[in-house]
Image (tube, rainbow, N blue to C red):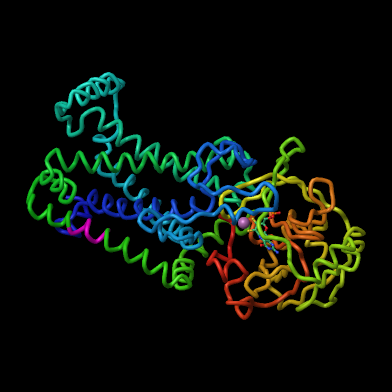
Amino acid sequence: MNPFAQAFGFLHWIGISHYLNLLLVGFMVRSGLEILSAHPKLYWRDDCNPGSEWLRLSRKKMPADRLWTGADEETAFSSFIALPGRRNLGMGRHWHFFCAIFWILNGLVYVGLLFGTGQWRRLVPTSWGIFPEAARDVWTYLHFHAPPAGHPYNAIQQLTYASVVFVLAPLLMLTGAAMSPAVAARFPWYVRLFGGRQPARSIHFLSLVAMVAFTFVHVLLVAVEDFPRNMAWIIHGDYSSERVAVWIGVAGLGVVLVLHVWATLFSLKHRRSVQRWLGWVIEPMRRALLHHVTSRQRYTEDDISPFFRVNGYPPASAEYQRLAERGFIEWRLSVGGLVEAPLELSLADLRALPKQTQITKHHCIQGWSAVGEWAGVAVAEMLDRCRPLPSARYLVLRGFDELDGRGYYETIDLELARHPQTLLAYEMNGAPLPIPHGAPCRLRVETQLGFKMVKYLRSIELVEDYHQLGDGQGGFREDTQFYGQEAGI
Ligand SMILES: Nc1nc2c(c(=O)[nH]1)N[C@H]1C(S)=C(S)[C@@H](COP(=O)(O)O)O[C@H]1N2
Ligand SMILES: [Mo]
């Protein structure tokens, strides 16, 4: 008997890992669909040109005669298919990453035990003969007969199981990692392995479809073949006590269903709690893995996207409009808070500082991307001039725009602020920053998602802590859309 079977008496480790897998994959499929609903379009190119999507799950049409934004393209999926549904990207992401952590751990334990116990022989084909054998089995299935039982699987089952465990699951993990802006910024070659961020996103989705199809057929076959006998094997690891196994199996499925309903309703009602509790697990992990990674992007002019989406409409305030009308001559960026030397920088002052240019890929949290060239002053240069006090830990960047009475703001810590490609950009693609993209000056933090990069900058304040600002979550979108403060994924 293996140690797990001993510890749990009647439970077999294959049963436990299958059960956790069913639970976690279900949660990840539904939260993944929630994420997709934020930008329900899939592309093969990272420019995400409107109209170039190969899959569109929305009927919304963007106007041709006025500015529209990525947020306008967002749709709501039903809570029956998405976790939690109803346009809750923040919630979908928390569930997706939370479950991903445990799914990977479960997968590692499963594969470890598979090899540790010799069970891998049932799963991994060891001879080329498997292929003609599988073809014969397909032929038999096509005639609606069951092929002869294998030992214990027939060739086609063995091939399918092996490819789910050793191809599909790793592919989901690898393409998932390729969608992290921090990974893409530090290792552009890694993303290129999949053909780019959008191909990785498309492959991730297609793998999800394959996973759902497999699970469906697998469960169906287990059920129609010999349900009690199969349940006994899954749960006990042998063919004893079939009746107990059936009951445990049915009860287990009931628990999965209840958990889905609970998580959906709870996430719709208590979004701040979900953000806090799941964030408590996810954020330290995200921070440890990705926070210290610096951007090493060096795209070429040929890579620059002909079309670059906008997110966040230009400020409606009279103050901003007046500044814009006069070409931002009177605009000043105030830098204050916990600094030795507060600054008031005009555009001319910024232009007089050392100029840095970078061509990078922008990752919006909703899923779209685009490549642009940005020029401006490194935030590190600005910090050298205002000299933060020892107690300063975060930069609070505020924009001129307001939504529902809240000013747009985001926070980044001093480490991110000092990264070499963290920039106060006043030019885009060789021209002064256009108004929709944040004129006269915006932040670029190239390892992070787009929402951290405040446009229409008004001020920068150095603070010790951000919890006393707004709703205390570290930014406008963290406060109102329940995103995580750490945006490397
Ligand atoms: N002031 C301000 N900055 C903002 C936003 C906003 O709404 N207001 N949206 C953010 C989001 S979600 C993204 S993806 C990027 C989009 O930058 P772009 O409009 O230049 O594409 O800006 C970020 N900065
Ligand atoms: Mo975004």
> In the image, is 422 to the left or to the right of 187?
right
Residue 213 image offset from top left, x and y in percent: 33, 40
Q: Which residues are magenta?
A: 251-256
Image quarter of residue 151: top left
Residue 468 image offset from top left, x and y in percent: 62, 81
> In the image, is 241 to the left or to the right of 67?
left
Q: Is residue 254 magenta?
A: yes
Quarter of the image where the C terminus is located: bottom right
Relative to 322, residue 444 above or below = above
Tell me the quadrant of ligand 2.
bottom right
Name the residue located 75 percent from the left edge and 38 percent from the top edge: 300
Name the residue located 48 percent from the left edge and 61 percent from the top edge: 88
Who is closer to the viewer here, 260 or 312? 312
Residue 356 image offset from top left, x and y in percent: 82, 52
Q: Residue furthest bottom?
A: 468
> In the image, is 204 to the left or to the right of 363?
left
Who is closer to the viewer here, 80 or 13? 80
